[in-house]
Image (spheres, rainbow, N blue to C red):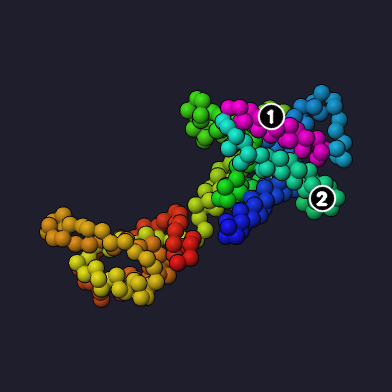
C-alpha cells in the first residue's frame, strides 16, 4: 500500500513540475513578448490582441489575469465537453492539470511583472535574433515540461481534449488535429500582426518542442538491444550474467544457410556494457553473429524496477 502511495506522490510531484515548467515558459517568455505558438496560451494572446484592435485597452496590471481567465474558461469548457463526449476517466485524469495550468500561469505572470523580467531581456519584436532566442528557449522549457507531465501519466488539457474528441468521433489522428488547431492560432497571430514572422516562430517552436517531448517521454538513458546468434549459448550467457549483470532471453534459431540449430541471446544493455560484451565476444565464440540496435524505451526488472 505504501509503495503504491509513494508512486502516486512521485507522479503528482513530477506532474506539477511539468505543469509549472509549461506555465513558466508562457508567463516569462511567450506572453511578455507576444509570441503565439499555438495552444490555449496562443489563443489567449490572440483574444487580447483582437480586443486591443477594437480599442479596448488592457493595462499591464490586468494583462496577466485576463490571459489566465481566458485560458481557464477555455479549459473548463473543453473539460465539460470531454465529460460528455469522452467519459469520466479522461475527465478526471485531465481535470487537475487543466485547472492548475492557468493558475500557475497567473502566479508566474505576476512574478515576472514584479521582478520586471522583460527589462532583463532587452528584446523587442523587431529584434529577430533576440526573438529567435526566446522561441528556442521557451520551446526547450515547454517541451521538457510537457514531456515530464505526459511521462508521469498526465494530460495537460486544452488542445489535448480536442485531439481526443476528433480521434474518437472522426478518426482524425492527434498530429493532424494539433497541426490544424495550432496552425489556425498561429496564422491568426500573423494576420493580426500583418507579417509572416509569427508563422516562422511558431513552426520552429512546434518542431523543437515535439522533438523534446519525444526525447523526455521515450528517453531517460541511452540503452541498446543486443542480439547474439551463437552455437555456444551457455558460455556467453554465463559471461553476461557474471560480468554485465543483466537479464537475458534465449530463443531457438536456425542457420538459414547451414541449417544448424543455434540459439539467439537477446539482452538490453547500456553503452558501456555493450562495449564490454563486444570486446569479448570473439573470445567466447569466434563464429558468433551479433547485431546491436538503439532502444528508445526500456521498462522492467533490471532497468526501471529493482531485481
SS of the residue at dot 1? helix
Q: Where is residue 4 in the image (x, y as percent from the top left)?
A: 57, 56
Question: Is residue 165 one of those drawn in magenta?
Answer: no
Q: Which residue is drawn at 61% across and 27% down?
A: 84
* Residue 242 % position (x, y): 35, 75
Vertical side of 278 occupied by 165: above or below:
above
Residue drawn at 71 percent across, 40 percent down: 99
How many numbered tags mark residues here? Answer: 2
Q: Which residue is drawn at 70% across and 37% down?
A: 41
Q: Is mark 2 on a helix, strand or loop?
A: helix
Disc assigned to residue 77: 1
Which residue is the extreme one toward the front?
1
Q: Residues within 10 Å of mark 1 (few under 14, many from 20)?
A: few
Q: Quadrant of the N terminus?
A: bottom right
Q: Residue 123 carries which label?
A: none
Which residue is disc 2 drawn over? Answer: 111
Say left or right for 271 vs 239: right
On the question of residue 121 being in view, the answer is: yes
Examine the residues drawn in magenta and state their main secondary structure: helix
Q: Residue furthest top?
A: 54
Q: For label 2, count other residues whose C-alpha is less than 10 Å away and answer few (under 14), some (14-19) or many (20+).
A: some
Q: How far apart are marks 1 and 2 (CA)?
A: 27 Å
Foreground pick, 24 / 79: 79
Q: Which quarter of the figure has residue 290?
A: bottom left
Q: Which residue is drawn at 60% across and 45% down?
A: 154
Q: Is residue 244 left or right of residue 202?
A: left
| Mark 1 vs 2, N-terminal side | 1
Q: Is residue 30 visible?
A: no
Instruction: Please report the bounds of the magenta region as a residue range.
Output: 63-85
Amino acid at each position: 500500500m505504501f509503495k503504491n502511495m509513494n508512486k502516486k506522490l512521485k507522479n503528482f510531484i513530477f506532474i506539477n513540475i511539468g505543469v509549472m515548467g509549461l506555465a513558466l515558459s508562457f508567463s516569462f517568455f511567450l506572453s511578455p513578448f507576444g509570441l503565439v505558438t499555438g495552444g490555449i496560451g496562443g489563443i489567449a494572446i490572440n483574444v487580447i490582441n483582437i480586443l486591443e484592435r477594437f480599442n479596448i485597452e488592457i493595462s499591464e496590471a490586468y494583462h496577466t489575469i485576463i490571459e489566465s481567465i481566458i485560458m481557464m474558461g477555455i479549459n473548463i469548457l473543453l473539460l465539460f465537453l470531454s465529460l460528455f463526449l469522452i467519459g469520466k476517466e479522461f475527465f478526471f485524469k485531465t481535470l487537475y492539470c487543466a485547472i492548475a495550468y492557468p493558475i500557475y500561469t497567473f502566479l508566474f505572470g505576476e512574478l515576472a511583472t514584479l521582478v520586471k523580467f522583460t527589462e532583463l531581456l532587452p528584446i523587442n519584436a523587431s529584434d529577430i535574433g533576440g526573438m529567435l532566442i526566446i522561441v528556442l528557449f521557451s520551446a526547450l522549457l515547454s517541451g521538457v515540461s510537457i514531456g515530464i507531465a505526459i511521462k508521469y501519466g498526465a494530460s495537460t488539457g486544452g488542445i489535448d481534449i480536442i485531439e481526443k474528441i476528433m480521434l474518437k468521433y472522426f478518426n482524425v489522428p492527434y498530429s493532424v488535429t494539433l497541426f490544424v488547431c495550432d496552425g489556425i492560432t498561429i496564422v491568426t497571430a500573423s494576420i493580426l500582426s500583418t507579417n509572416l514572422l509569427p508563422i516562422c516562430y511558431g513552426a520552429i517552436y512546434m518542431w523543437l518542442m515535439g522533438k523534446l517531448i519525444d526525447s523526455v517521454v521515450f528517453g531517460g538513458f541511452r540503452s541498446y538491444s543486443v542480439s547474439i546468434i551463437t552455437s555456444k549459448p551457455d558460455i556467453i550467457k554465463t559471461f553476461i550474467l557474471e560480468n554485465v549483470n543483466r537479464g537475458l532471453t534465449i530463443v531457438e534459431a536456425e542457420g538459414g544457410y547451414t541449417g544448424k540449430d543455434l540459439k539467439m541471446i537477446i539482452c538490453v544493455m547500456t553503452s558501456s556494457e555493450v562495449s564490454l560484451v563486444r570486446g569479448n565476444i570473439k573470445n567466447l565464440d569466434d563464429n558468433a553473429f551479433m547485431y546491436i540496435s538503439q532502444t528508445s524505451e526500456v521498462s522492467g526488472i533490471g532497468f526501471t524496477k529493482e531485481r
